[in-house]
């Protein structure tokens, strides 16, 4: 029970962090380039597991919409972000928990890169469907690659560099905590 409450508190911390960071990075114009909300949800999914990563990803956009109504319109941007971040938190937790590769750092990188690719494709598919339903024209492959891989390319590189380090530091701290108890 204590562990579950601790995980809920950490998840709420990640949601709060996402809500606080979004306006800051939006003001300086780096939100789409650094994909800062993805950082928060990825780390949450890795550290707490897929249920908490999914909850974090699904809750950040509506909370931002409620607290800061002018910053994020719920439809289509908030809904698109909700789906993308939800998939991000879900897949990071699921793939990492499967422990596909026995080497922990390689497993983190495998889960991270796979998650980034899956969430980018799902976000792109949502945009394709949205454009088709709304009669906004055709959202083609060039648009998908530009919006989901080129524009946030620097942020994706930063995720690949820093998320594994944060996850490893957390796991090291967690292991030290367990050794002190026993």
Image (tube, rainbow, N blue to C red):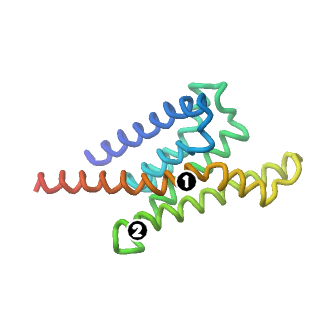
The residue positioned 62% from the left and 34% from the top of the image is 29
- What residue is shown at x 48% (from left), y 58% (from top)? 92
**88 with respect to 139 (left or right):** left
Q: Is residue 176 left or right of residue 61?
A: left
**Residue at mark 1 to residue at mark 2: CA–CA distance:** 18 Å
User: Which residue carries the number 2 mark?
Assistant: 107
Side (left or right) of 33 relative to 90: right
Q: Is residue 28 above or below residue 135?
A: above
Give me the disc on residue 96: none
Q: How far from the left and from the top, in percent, is residue 143?
A: 77, 54
Residue 27 picture location, percent across and down: 60, 28
Identify the residue at horizontal 36%, vertical 51% (top origin).
166
Which disc is residue 156 wearing?
Answer: 1
- Dot 2 crowding, Cα within 10 Å, few <14, some 14–19, many 20+: some
Q: Residue 7 location, x and y as percent? A: 34, 46
At a point 18% along the width and 51% down the height, the residue shown is 177
Closest to the observer, 110 or 97: 110
- Image quarter for residue 5? top left
Tag 2, which secondary structure?
helix
In the image, residue 89 sits, relative to residue 72, either above or below, namely below
Q: Where is the C terminus found, in terms of image quarters?
A: bottom left
């Amino acid at each position: 029970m204590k562990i579950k409450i601790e995980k809920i508190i950490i998840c709420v911390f990640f949601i709060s962090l996402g809500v606080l960071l979004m306006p800051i990075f939006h003001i300086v114009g780096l939100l789409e380039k650094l994909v800062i909300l993805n950082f928060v949800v990825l780390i949450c999914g890795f550290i707490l597991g897929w249920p908490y990563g999914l909850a974090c990803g699904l809750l950040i956009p509506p909370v931002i919409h409620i607290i800061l109504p002018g910053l994020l319109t719920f439809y289509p941007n908030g809904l698109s972000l909700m789906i993308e971040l939800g998939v991000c938190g879900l897949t990071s937790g699921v793939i990492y928990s499967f422990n596909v590769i026995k080497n922990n750092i390689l497993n983190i990188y495998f889960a991270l890169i796979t998650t980034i690719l899956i969430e980018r494709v799902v976000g792109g598919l949502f945009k394709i469907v949205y454009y088709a339903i709304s009669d906004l024209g055709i959202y083609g492959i060039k648009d998908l690659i530009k919006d989901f891989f080129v524009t946030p390319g620097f942020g994706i590189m930063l995720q690949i560099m820093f998320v594994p380090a944060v996850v490893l530091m957390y796991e090291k701290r967690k292991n030290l905590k367990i050794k002190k108890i026993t």
